[in-house]
Amino acid sequence: MLPAIEQELRRQIKRLDAGATRPFHDMLAYHMGWTHGKGATARAGKRIRPLLLLLVSDAAGSRWKDALPAAAAMEIIHNFSLVHDDIQDNSPTRRGRPALWTLHGSALAINAGDALLTIANQAMLDLEKRYPPAVVVEAARILQDACLDLTRGQYLDLSHQDTNRLTLRNYWTMIGGKTAALLSACTEIGAILGGAGGKWRAGYREFGRLLGAAFQVQDDILGIWGDESATGKSAAIDLAEGKLSLPVVYGLRQRGRFARSWTNARTRPKRTTALRHMLEKEGAYDYSARQARRLTNQALAQLRSLRPQGPAGAALAELTEQLLGRQT
Amino acid sequence: MLPAIEQELRRQIKRLDAGATRPFHDMLAYHMGWTHGKGATARAGKRIRPLLLLLVSDAAGSRWKDALPAAAAMEIIHNFSLVHDDIQDNSPTRRGRPALWTLHGSALAINAGDALLTIANQAMLDLEKRYPPAVVVEAARILQDACLDLTRGQYLDLSHQDTNRLTLRNYWTMIGGKTAALLSACTEIGAILGGAGGKWRAGYREFGRLLGAAFQVQDDILGIWGDESATGKSAAIDLAEGKLSLPVVYGLRQRGRFARSWTNARTRPKRTTALRHMLEKEGAYDYSARQARRLTNQALAQLRSLRPQGPAGAALAELTEQLLGRQT
């Protein structure tokens, strides 16, 4: 499926590849990982969202090729959020390369993100060639609802950045509005394109939500304990940048040495190794790993209860396991 | 129609008005002009886009009340672009009040713009309650195409900002991708909701395009020669900020005193009165006013050829005339 996804993505982004806006297209192509950056090779994302959507649509009874525009839409939405996130978080790198805004400035990068969001919506409407308009409207509505959840999650994330008052409960709300929102939209859209209604549709949505939560917790763990050469980010980058991830939120709640050291934002970048050790000592790694395992097991149980059909069903279980075991 | 538009706009933005994202909703309500800002009263926009859409839908045979979600969608898209424009252009004020980003910072304001774009898309899908899904998909597609044109226009605008090499031809392309894109989408969507197909639909689209171009040229004139107390912006703000508007592009092409003085960006804010006089002397005001009149006449002729029905038809002609005569 991956080459077909890549081809559909390029086809969608090509909308901007003409005349005076060709350099604008090239900005998007760079971000999507198709072209080289300064001192870095091309590097694309893992395309987990489109894979998930195609596998669910196939397991639920559609021809996965028909669902390609929807799969591209979800990957492009994800990339829209990355472009704007990097500006908002002041993050200079993305996938081991300079972030788009560092190359072209914030103004043009905001606009590139807006274009990605728009192209994602256009891609979703392209479903009309293969599905009845009522299904297209439904899929578009799920996409929009997920986008609004993204902005809600981002609002909570950005407005908590400096307060250190994020509780564990708020943490789960926040990630519910970020990774989990997009992944549950992928599985729900896959289900309706496969013709699954009622409780099957809701069941696939719940599978995506659990998978998304597991995925985000794993991402939080890798942001602190990940292998630099594999993730393409510097080790413990999330600690240096003060990101409120699950281990940090857990650590702050222990009100121990970590919580006291974390408060001084200025010394964080120099003290990442020490902060990481404190987190380990106070149980944040074990807690987070347990949560990731719990959520993955719940996602797998949910998936089994849906009895997905054929090789796509087996591939879904495999993808879920892989996402937990991943190092990047 | 205006109170009904305002009610529908509030209903759409209310999607964010719950729990932890209530302050996020309030950011949007402030930008929409419903709540007070620091030292400024509430001040909403002119709602020209939704009015235009409702009038065309009515003149083309729909009940305008059914078209309200589409009208709200277009006004919200317009406001999305204003929120991001102000960040991109570093403009501190909007409608005589602090721009959203100056109150909440760029990160949260980028996110607020993303939410507006998403809510606009959701509003458009709300048409499903009154129109068949195929019409909804068509309206959503016109909206998305207009959004992509917006980002194209914005790309050209931002990437020309420092080069001074904008030709008159590029100017018309640029505004084609900004004001004209949204206004032609309003009239085209109004037409299809009214059941107008084929050449009528294309005719209304062209009317919107001409009106949008006339509107933008008038905006450019007001940005240099407008009355400060009426526009809510400081006089000649476009000259101080170095905006490449039609009078400036015309002036640069004369290669006279204005062109030489304009080049020094640092002295511009202090020399706006002198620059304005040079532009007048070199014919930029007369040229721009002639273009605005020409485009308005073309828009009116186009409208007459469509023979819009009933009082909405008469109101459309009146609105077109008003837009040219406006002082704000």
Image (cartoon, coloured by chain):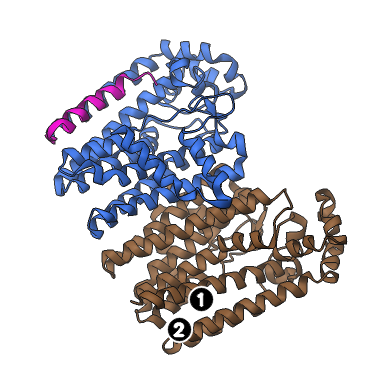
Chain colours: A blue, B brown
**Which mark is drawn over residue B207?**
1
Q: Nearer the viewer, residue B30 or B107?
A: B107
Q: Which residues are magenta?
A: A306-328
Report, in whole angstroms, how far the alpha carbon at label 1 lies from the one at label 2.
9 Å
Res. B55 in view: yes
Contact (Cβ within 8 Å) of mark 1 with mark 2: yes
- For label 1, the crowd category at 10 Å Cα-Cα, with few meaning under 14, some 14 to 19 and many 20 or more, is many
Residue depicted at 34% across the width and 40% down the height: A182
Secondary structure mainly formed by the magenta segment: helix
* Image vertical order of residue A239 relative to residue B235, above or below: above
Q: Nearer the viewer, residue A141 or B35?
A: A141
Residue depicted at 56% across the width and 52% down the height: A19
Q: Is residue B20 magenta?
A: no
**Which residue in the structure is indicated by mark 2?**
B306
Residue B244 image point, x, y percent: 70, 58
Res. B100 in view: no
Residue depicted at 50% across the width and 86% down the height: B304
Question: With A7 as the anchor, is B284 left or right in this view?
Answer: right
Three-letter residue code for mark 1: Phe
Disc 2 element: loop
Residue B20 image point, x, y percent: 42, 45
* Image vertical order of residue B31 relative to residue A168, above or below: below
Q: Chain of mark 1?
A: B
Q: Nearer the viewer, residue A16 or A76?
A: A16
Figure quadrant of the C terminus of chain B: bottom right
Disc 1 element: helix
